[in-house]
Image (tube, rainbow, N blue to C red):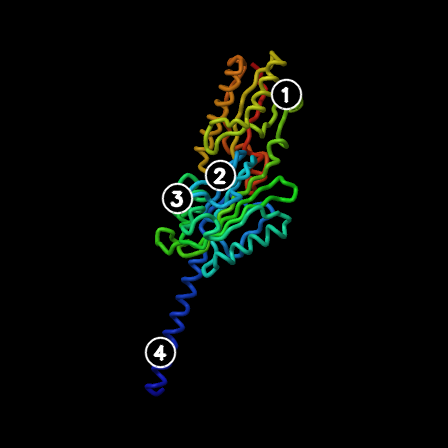
Amino acid sequence: MSLRHWKQALIGAVISIFSCLVLASSATAQSCPDLPGFAPLDSLPVYDGACLFGAKDAGFTAFDLITGPLKGRAKGEIVAVEGTLQRRLYVGPEGTSAFDLFSNYRNALVQGGFDILFECVERACGSPNALLGKTVIYGPDRKLKNLKAQSEFALYIAGEEHYLAARSADGTRHIAVYVAQNQKNSISGQAAGRAAVHIDLITSAALAEKMIDAAAMAKGITDEGHVALDNVYFDFGTATLTPEAKPAIAEMVKLLTENPGLKVYIVGHTDWVGDPATNQALSEQRAQAVVAALVQAGIAGERLGAAGMGLYAPRASNTTEAGRSLNRRVELVERAD
């Protein structure tokens, strides 16, 4: 082999090795972090190759859906909705633009029968500095921290802000979709420089569907010895009862007042998201909070007991949001003594 041919072969080998390294690096960059326990949102496909970096299933809550540009640093027009809130934060594949990511989600919603209530791009959202995303959509009080800093900075906005608010044809679901391009800062790790999408989905039919009155509670206890209550709502991750729990507490008070000989255990249950020990403690604290509310309403404390089962007694699979929703509950269990 001549010296010239030898040099050409060496250069080719180096290029081949370099190409393999680049491909391996890209494959590593495209791998997703491990964030189990959160299903994709109903009727909304995930962008091909996007990775889930943060999620929260917040239960029943009030939500301000932004339907107009910011006014200064404050919310402009809003639609106040109530329902089960689910949040997801995805980071698009390397090379995907914010426009492409946003357009795909917009098209999916329109094809799914959603009506667009408001949409904006950059300055039309109220500021040239992406303040909608930085102060409202992903402000300090709304940062997701499932994976600690890896989630918190998965939406670290540089610009190219896109936003839309939409409502389903039957009016039971409202959605906010926010897309921006991330800064190329190393603090964002794998998400640096990529387009990210943050989604809020509020399903408003949940409260009415889950309501169980005193008569249904009595029948459940008579027939089965226990009855599950899905409409006892707490602030996310706490044992603080929300105002939306008042109807369920009132029906429990009615049940116990109309059946003075009835004694019950209040038993808390959780889904499997989070640490088992933390879930166990939280389920016990929530049961105790319900007992305290019943005592405050006039029910004798000696008729009540509190217990927690944590994640250990599911009634549905925890691999889907529908299943996890069923597993987050309070049960009344008949006592013998």
- Quadrant in the picture for residue 82: top right
> Which residue carries the number 1 mark?
214
Q: Which element carries disc 3, helix, strand or loop? A: loop
Q: Where, quadrant-wise, is the C terminus in this rendering?
A: top right
Question: Residue 152: image x %, image y %?
Answer: 40, 45
Q: What's the CA distance linking mark 3 and mark 4?
A: 46 Å
Question: Residue 71: image x %, image y %?
Answer: 45, 43
Query: Where 57 falls versus 44 (above or below)?
Result: above
Point out the tag, 2 or 1, that comes first from the N-terminus: 1
Q: Nearer the viewer, mark 2 or mark 3?
A: 3
> Which residue carries the number 2 mark?
273
Q: Residues within 10 Å of mark 2 (few under 14, many from 20)?
A: some
Residue at 39% in and 66% down? 21
Q: What's the CA distance linking mark 2 and mark 4?
A: 54 Å
Residue at 45% in and 58% down? 30
Query: Where 109 falls versus 16 (above or below)?
Result: above
Residue 317 appearing in the image: no
Q: Which element carries disc 4, helix, strand or loop? A: helix
Q: Residues within 10 Å of mark 1 (few under 14, many from 20)?
A: some
> Which residue carries the number 4 mark?
10
Q: Residue furthest bottom?
A: 2
Query: Where 165 falls versus 337 (above or below)?
Result: below
